[in-house]
Image (cartoon, rainbow, N blue to C red):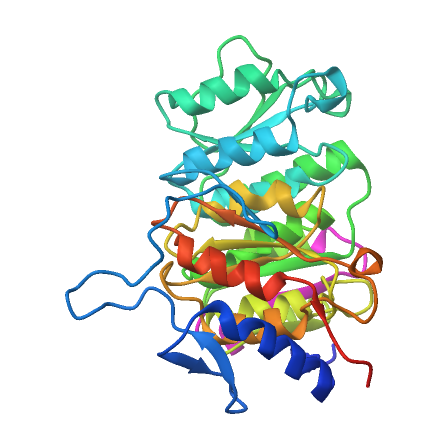
Amino acid sequence: MPPATLARVPPRRFSPPALAAVLLACAGCGSGGGEKRSDGRDAGPVLAQQGSGGDERTAPVPAQTATKNTTRLGGADPVADAAAVARAVFPGRTRETRPRAVVLVARDDWRAGISAAQLAAAPLSAPLLLGGADELPEVTRDALEELAPVGAPQARGAQVVRVGSVAPPGRLRSPVIEGTDPAALAQAIDRFHTEVGGTPGRDVVVAPLNRPDLAMPAAGWAAKSGDPVLWADRARLPPQTRAAIRSRPRPRIWVLGGPEGVGESVLARLRRLGPVTRIAGIDAVATAIAFARFRRSGFGWGVVDPGHGLVVASTRRPQDAAAAAPLSASGKYGPLLLVPDGRVLPNALQEYLLDIKPGYSEDPVRGVYNHAWLMGNESAVSVAVQARIDALLEITRVQAP
């Protein structure tokens, strides 16, 4: 097998006149304490700094659900976030806006949630909700009642698919997908998806078992593509992961994150099963951006230009990756991007948003637009960060080169 390669996608840059216009447009977003891009230029203010009195220097405005280029969904935890996303994707007021089935995942099992995002892809196209082993939270019960899943013929009429240890949803038809550990459960989810959809595809994503921050972006891609998210760690390739890969014709293996998540010895074992490509950055934020940029032989988002949907979540809430996954599989299909601290927009993410910022020369009506979904309340992503993201997504007049 060919050796594994490290995917490095070159950033897209505006021409100097266009970039100057973008930076000028962003100059009014704040003042003082400005962060610098890696090329030394100003990238805007550091958001939510601590003032001398210990208070955050943010605009005195209440939390809001939407700006002109962003929409916030969810609340205080991933359970609420999943319910909000499910209702946004499936309003449920007419039969065509009700899902065929809903996936229920244990609220405290982020690995099960990320792997279960595969079921948000066609043909099931199921939103994900979160519950406990003994009972379902009220917000989940309410969402299920409003969604009123009609039943999936491909899954023998199932209305709810339970993944792992999660309480049953009353009288709704609800088969269970079980596994003794994350790797076995991921294999079982993939097997179920194949039974529902037919022949498995070639591509698989192998994510780090013990690094949720590196694994999170895999959920959005699984929801969009139907590719499975399988598991490995620094030194071990579980037999269930190996078996799931071998079940595919001429598999192609895409490893998310650096060797701190999935080690080089594991890659050597994966190479015996098929060609391997590692997609990674220097940290979780950079890895998510690298995955968003990446495109090769039909695999990957390839978001290197304006006109896309994006999803932003906090690494402090790993299960938000599963909660947000249906947003990547419908509407404004787009990759998951990450913020480690909801009060600050990382430099790397600011640079990426600048690189894909929309521009127009004559009429903005003829332009293309970016939009971001933000997951959770202010404890996940602050209003100040939301405002900064809105400014970076705004279509801006640029001079022709």
Q: Which residue corresponds to the image point at 54% horizontal and 91% vertical from the top-left?
A: 39
Residue toward you, 104 or 343 = 343
Tell me if I can see residue 266 in this picture.
Answer: no
Residue toward you, 26 or 212 = 26
User: In this picture, is 383 found above or below 164?
Assistant: below
* Residue 255 is covered by the magenta coloring: yes
- Tell me the quarter of the picture where residue 133 sits: top left
Q: Residue furthest left?
A: 53
User: In this picture, is 38 found above or below 102?
Assistant: below
Start and end of the magenta stretch? 246-265
Residue toward you, 257 or 315 = 315
- Tell me the quarter of the picture where residue 176 sits: top right
Q: Which residue corresponds to the image point at 80% horizontal and 61% vertical from the top-left?
A: 367
* Residue 12 is covered by the magenta coloring: no
Q: Residue furthest top?
A: 171
Looking at the rendered structure, the number of numbered marks drawn on it comes to 0
Residue 182 location (% of width, % of height): 47, 47
Relative placement, left or right, of 177 versus 261 is right
Relative placement, left or right, of 31 versus 237 is left
Quarter of the image with the C terminus in it: bottom right
Q: Main secondary structure of the magenta part?
A: loop
Quarter of the image with the N terminus in it: bottom right
Tell me if I can see residue 159 in this picture.
Answer: yes
User: In this picture, is 391 found above or below 68?
Assistant: below
Residue toward you, 396 or 97 = 396
Residue 185 location (% of width, % of height): 53, 41
Residue 246 location (% of width, % of height): 70, 55
Residue 269 location (% of width, % of height): 59, 71
Relative placement, left or right, of 211 versus 293 is left
- Tell me the quarter of the picture where residue 397 sits: bottom right
Q: Which residue corresponds to the image point at 72% horizontal and 86% vertical from the top-left?
A: 17
